[in-house]
Every structure is written in C-alpha cells, then in structure tokens.
Amino acid sequence: MADITTLVQAEQVRLDSDSLGALYRQLGEANADEVICRAVEELAVRLTQSERLWREGDWAALRKSVRSLVAISKQVGMSKLSRVAGDVITALDNNDAVAAAATLTRLLRVGERSLTAVWDLQDLSI
C-alpha cells in the first residue's frame, strides 16, 4: 500500500509598510483606517465572488473580479496578493484551466492570510 503525503501550504505574507505609510501620510490616520477597512471588506467579498465564479465556470467575470483584487490589494500594501492575482489573470488569459485552478487556490490562501495580517496589524495599533 502506498503512503500518502500531505503537503502543508505555509506561505508567509507581509504588508508593504512603505505603501501603508504613504497611505497614512496622504490621508491621515482616520481616513487611512477607513480606506483600509473598506478595502479589507471589498477584498473579502471579491475573494468569495472569485471562488464562486470559478465553480460556475464564468471565466470572463472571474477575470474581472480578480483584476479588481489587483488594484485594491496594491492600494493597501498587499503586494503578494496583488502578484498572485496577476498570476491568475495570466492563467485565465492563456486559457490554462489547470494553472488557473492552482493559482486561484493560491490566491484564496494568500488572500485569507493577507486579510488576517491586516486585522492583526489593526489590533496592534489599538
């Protein structure tokens, strides 16, 4: 009987402190906090929507949803999330279903960890 190995996906995410610092300098603390909260909410919605669109096979709408993740995540210093979302778009543009499935799964994982990182950062600032 063959042994089954389970791979643990442990990927570090970090927020780009330079991007966040610039956001706080431009908007001030209260406004930057508001922008970040709205962005986190929108990212959570878009991640869920992206997963649903994948299951439905609506690649055009999925591409649009993931494209919005790129812009939002860049705005709040989530460079890894933005980069992985770009990888999903590339896979979709190449009509590569296997790569799209793999990168979307990674996007969901990185997205969840990125949202947790923001909440942890906000907990530290209180």
Image: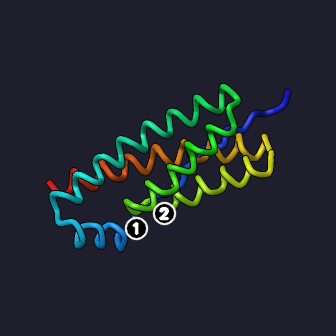
Q: Amino acid at mark 2?
A: Ser
Q: Residue at x 40, y 67 (%)?
A: 16
Q: Mark 2 Cα within 10 Å, few/some/many (few <14, many 20+)?
A: some
Circle 2 residue? 79
Callout 1 touching callout 2 (CB < 8 Å): yes
Position of residue 60 measured from the top left corner of the image (x, y, whole percent) = 67, 39
Circle 1 residue? 16
Q: Mark 1 Cα within 10 Å, few/some/many (few <14, many 20+)?
A: some
Q: Is residue 58 above or below residue 117?
A: above
Q: Viewer-proximal residue, 57 or 107? A: 57
Q: Residue at x 17, y 62 (%)?
A: 29
Label 1 sits on a secondary structure element that is loop
C-alpha distance separating marks 1 and 2: 7 Å
Position of residue 123 measured from the top left corner of the image (x, y, whole percent) = 21, 50
Q: Amino acid at mark 1?
A: Asp
Q: Relative to 88, is 29 on the left or the right?
A: left
Label 2 sits on a secondary structure element that is helix
First-in-chain label (1 vs 2): 1
Q: Quadrant of the N terminus?
A: top right
Position of residue 10 measured from the top left corner of the image (x, y, whole percent) = 55, 50
Q: Residue at x 55, y 42 (%)?
A: 65
